[in-house]
Image (tube, coloured by chain):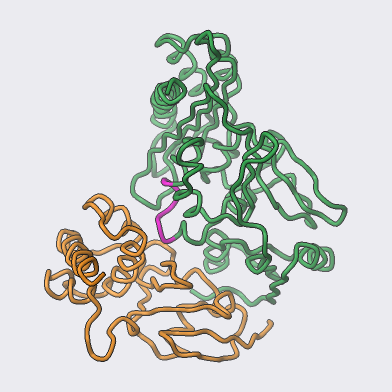
Amino acid sequence: MSKHKITVTVNGQPRQAEVPARLLLVHFIRETLGLTGTHIGCDTTSCGACTVLLNGRAVKSCTILAVQANGGEITTVEGLAQNGKLHPIQEGFHMEHGLQCGFCTPGMMLSAIALLKQNPNPTEDDIRWGLSGNLCRCTGYVNIVKAVQYAAEKLRAER
Amino acid sequence: MIPPEFDYVAPTTLQEAIAVLEQKPDAKILAGGHSLIPLLKFRLASVNTLVDINRIDGLSYIREEGGWLKIGAMTREADLEHDPLIGQKYPLLADAARMIADPLVRNMATVGGNLAHADPANDHPAVMLAYGAVIVAAGPNGLREIPITQFFTDLFTTALAPNEILSEIRIPAHKAGNGGCYQKLERKVGDYATAAVAVQIHIGANGVCDTAGIGLTNVGPMPIKAVAAEQALVGSKLDDGAIKRAAQLAADAAQPQSDYRGTEEYKRALVKTLTVRALRKALERASN
């Protein structure tokens, strides 16, 4: 099995490692880098708990090889707060009670950030459509939608 | 779940990738990876070498040229979904792109991969059958064109040779009077179709249908072209009777099996209903 030296920028920091070809990106993030905010849920490309941003796009890191990310930029939930200040999407989940157990939350937030970048003023339908690759088993999604609306408003005000 | 061990190469040109395929006939191409990586994780597939074609420039594009809509094999489903040209002129493709898997998967999954994987549950095969698309394969001796009707040869099997790479998909360019629609029933976002129907028609100046393509998703061991239904539409004005007759013929062409998504009888009835809906919508779009 081939091994590969990769360099990836994770939350703004360049990280280097030698990885076996079959290492999944989610295991690289959690085990090699120790960033356990990215969760493994279904492990079958269904639930979206492992969602990260890869070169600005929201993707399921359980279905990408670490070596595929070589040279890329990754954002995980650990990279959202800046200087101790929560990102507007984190603030939205906090203020609108957008989580109960919290397992899906990192993935939800990263999908929401990608959605709001593409569509800063989404309707409720747009939000539900945009988050349709992320499953939540607690909330019934109502407060998650509110959290994204909160963040959308805050991000528009910051512009 | 951990995939089995394999070697990995990431060539930067098609020629290099083809050279690897020539040396290693058991190699497998990695495009978006959202069918292949799950298969490897489930240990339903194993491979000695993965040839990652994501680092080859120039395989992702959507453009009209010489009477064709040309789509690069590595074009992501999300790019199709958000492309203004597709949105305006290729509604069948736009419908399908929105219904494939979920938004996160669509950021990785590719049009070429969806076709080359040749899963009868995938959506693009039926869409391309309805459009009458042409598949372009790159091999050691250059490019080869394969009509879509000759592309799917068996379950998960295509006419691509082991040393060929699907490089482009060509769809006849939109002209006035064209209309299309994809109707898919899925149990939830991200599931494969219980059944789906792709329709592409052309209505002439006299209001008569002169071209019709109908493809069926996930109702047989291969994607199905409903030829008798297509023939019944040509020369008709697509009134209610003609639409219902064609829908029955499409249902007759389906070869569904009973499973956890529904019984054989249910799926056949579904094909009929979805064909009626797709034809009505395609006709409305052709008239606009």
Residue B180: where, in percent of width, then height? 49, 29
Q: Is residue A94 above or below residue A35?
A: above
Q: Residue at x 52, y 57 (%)?
A: B109
Q: Is residue B96 above or below residue B270?
A: below
The one nearer the camera, A81 or A1, is A81
Provide the residue span drawn in magenta.
B98-104
Residue B4: where, in percent of width, then height? 60, 74
Q: Colour of chain B?
A: green
Q: Is residue B184 above or below residue B118?
A: above
Quarter of the image where the C terminus of chain B is located: top left
Q: Residue at x 55, y 43 (%)?
A: B124
Report the residue that reaches farthest toward the right: B141
The quarter of the displayed image where residue A144 is located: bottom left
Q: Residue at x 75, y 40 (%)?
A: B146
Q: Colour of chain A?
A: orange
Q: Is residue B147 above or below residue B161?
A: above
The one nearer the camera, A111 or B122, is A111
Residue B127: where, in percent of width, then height? 55, 37
